[in-house]
Amino acid sequence: MAFVPADFEVPGGLTAPAFRLVPLGPQHNVADHAAWTTSIEHVRATPGFQSGRWPPLEGMTLEENHGDLERHARDFAARTGFTYSVLEPDGDDVLGCVYIYPARDEEHDAAVASWVRASVADLDVELWAAVGRWLEDAWPFTAVKYADRGAS
């Protein structure tokens, strides 16, 4: 079964006062790498990332990161998963990332995770709330698994 219906028009992004979402791609490599490598412990403490698998404590090279971004872009093109860079509102600095992939359980049709870099930690709840509303309004999912931030 397809992750999203064949006739579903995948959103090109989301614009909010404090950030904007754009599809993640290799063009974000340097800024993406800088965002998460300066925030490894912060990201690992973010709801949804506490399993300790990502980001790797030892980091990864720019080349390895580029490969990871290429994989996410291929998933997006194939409509099997959708990853968005969280960018500053008026620039291209990466503030974080949002991942929308099929859920691995029977109760949900999508699993969503998001993180922001440590320097903008206060943006996390705002991003979570905005993405939650966006998922309800613009996506075809009925049951989304997205780690609660304890805010409404």
Image (tube, grey):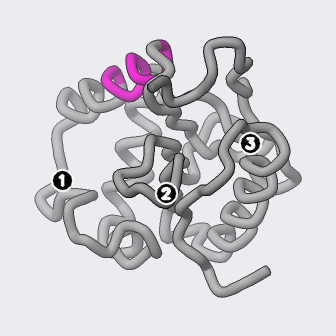
Comparing marks 1 and 2, which lies closer to the viewer? 2
Q: CA distance from mark 1 to mark 3?
A: 26 Å
Task: Give the labeled residue for mark 2.
Answer: 113
Task: Give the labeled residue for mark 1.
Answer: 59
Q: What range of the chain is rendered magenta?
A: 70-77
Task: Specify whether residue 63 is painted magenta.
Answer: no
Mark nearer the N terminus (1 vs 2): 1
Q: Amino acid at mark 1?
A: Gly
Taking the spot 84% from the left edge, 49% from the top edge, the residue there is: 16
- Please say if the residues under marks 1 and 2 sit with CB atoms less than 8 Å apart: no
Q: Is residue 119 left or right of residue 74?
A: right
Q: Quadrant of residue 32?
A: top left
Q: CA distance from mark 1 to mark 2?
A: 19 Å
Taking the spot 75% from the left edge, 66% from the top edge, the residue there is: 129
Task: Give the labeled residue for mark 3.
Answer: 20
The 10 Å Cα crowd at callout 3, few under 14, some 14 to 19, many 20 or more, is many
Q: Is residue 68 left or right of residue 118?
A: left
Task: Specify whether residue 72 is painted magenta.
Answer: yes
Quadrant where the C terminus is found in the figure: bottom right
SS at badge 3: strand
Whether residue 61 is visible = yes
Mark nearer the N terminus (1 vs 3): 3
Q: Residue furthest bottom?
A: 150
Taking the spot 72% from the left edge, 32% from the top edge, the residue there is: 13
The 10 Å Cα crowd at callout 2, few under 14, some 14 to 19, many 20 or more, is some
